[in-house]
Amino acid sequence: MARQTKNRYAPSNATVAINLKLKPASNLKWHRVLFKISGSALAGNCQNIDPKVAMQIAREVATTCRLGVEVAIVVGGRNFFCGDAWVSATGLDRPMAYQIGMMGTVMNSILLQSALEKLGVQTRVQNTFLMPEVAEPYRRQRAIRHLEKGRVIFGGVGAGTGNPHFTTDTAAALRASELTNVNGVFDCHPHNDNVTLDHISFREIVSRNVTSMDMMALAYCEENGIPVVVFNMLEPGNVSRALCGS
């Protein structure tokens, strides 16, 4: 008798996720996007991660996927561990502190993967650290193939770039250039309700300091012609509207 091979990267639960690659709607602005989620936004009113926020994101990403948009996600890890805060408070070695924060990005990815799989959306977590029991190693061609099959990928997010000196914003900019052919969407959740702008240049956003997005990531996006959308992720409907190009 032939034994069925178990996918060791998929979360084990009773939900069977069946993804049919849908033909994209004709009015979509983008057909493949990179969605950056800040770890602090995931915390909501909780200490680590708010289940309501996680499920809201999952529902809106699922809605976006069913319209035919291919979605790659990069997640921060600040809700679990903030390396900068620990370096300032304890003098902890900076690379070591950032490596601890990288583990937070992996935990966030697996939590969101579970939420999406519950809604019937196939996902893959790809990691720059070797964690074979929970994630695939990041490979660009494999990531693109997953997207083409209609799967949501957490593209190389686990541990960002794998280098402790680069933020997950920079990792998101890098993955956007690798995977999306200059179509990038970021959510930085800057916690500043006094700033509402429809459009702003990269140079102006740096000079006016209206976002918490990493300056290196902004410079990389500008150099590579990657459009950036910054929006309030916690406003219902905003995620799916942004990912669909509103």
Image (cartoon, rainbow, N blue to C red):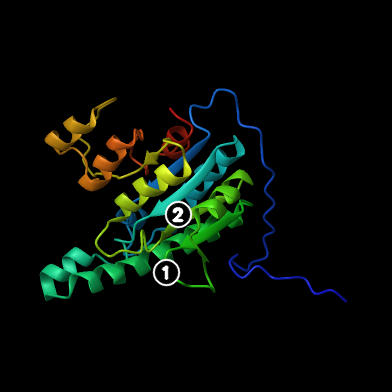
Task: Determine the secondary structure under disc 2.
Answer: helix
Between 228 and 143, the residue placed more toward the observer is 143
Q: Is residue 214 visible?
A: no
Query: As displayed, is residue 134 above or below residue 207?
Result: below
Q: Is residue 115 visible?
A: yes
Q: Position of residue 130 (x, y in %)?
A: 46, 72
Q: Which residue is mark 2?
A: 54
Please rate how many residues cluster around mark 1, counting C-alpha atoms within 10 Å: few if below 14, some from 14 to 19, many from 20: many
The residue depicted at 28 percent of the width and 36 percent of the height is 223
- Say whether residue 192 is left or right of residue 45: left
The residue depicted at 77 percent of the width and 71 percent of the height is 4
Report, in whole angstroms, how far the alpha carbon at label 2 lies from the one at label 1. 24 Å
Query: As displayed, is residue 52 above or below residue 8?
Result: above
Work out which quarter of the rendered image holds the C terminus and state it: top left
Q: Position of residue 20 (x, y in %)?
A: 69, 44
Q: Are marks 2 and 1 in contact (CB under 8 Å)?
A: no
The residue depicted at 22 percent of the width and 37 percent of the height is 193
Q: Earlier in the sequence, mark 2 or mark 1?
A: 2
Quadrant in the rendering for residue 25: top right
Work out which quarter of the rendered image holds the N terminus and state it: bottom right
Between 109 and 169, the residue placed more toward the observer is 169
Query: As displayed, is residue 133 above or below residue 77?
Result: below
Between 129 and 12, the residue placed more toward the observer is 129
Quadrant in the rendering for residue 70: top right
Q: Which residue is mark 1?
A: 129
Amino acid under disc 2: Ala
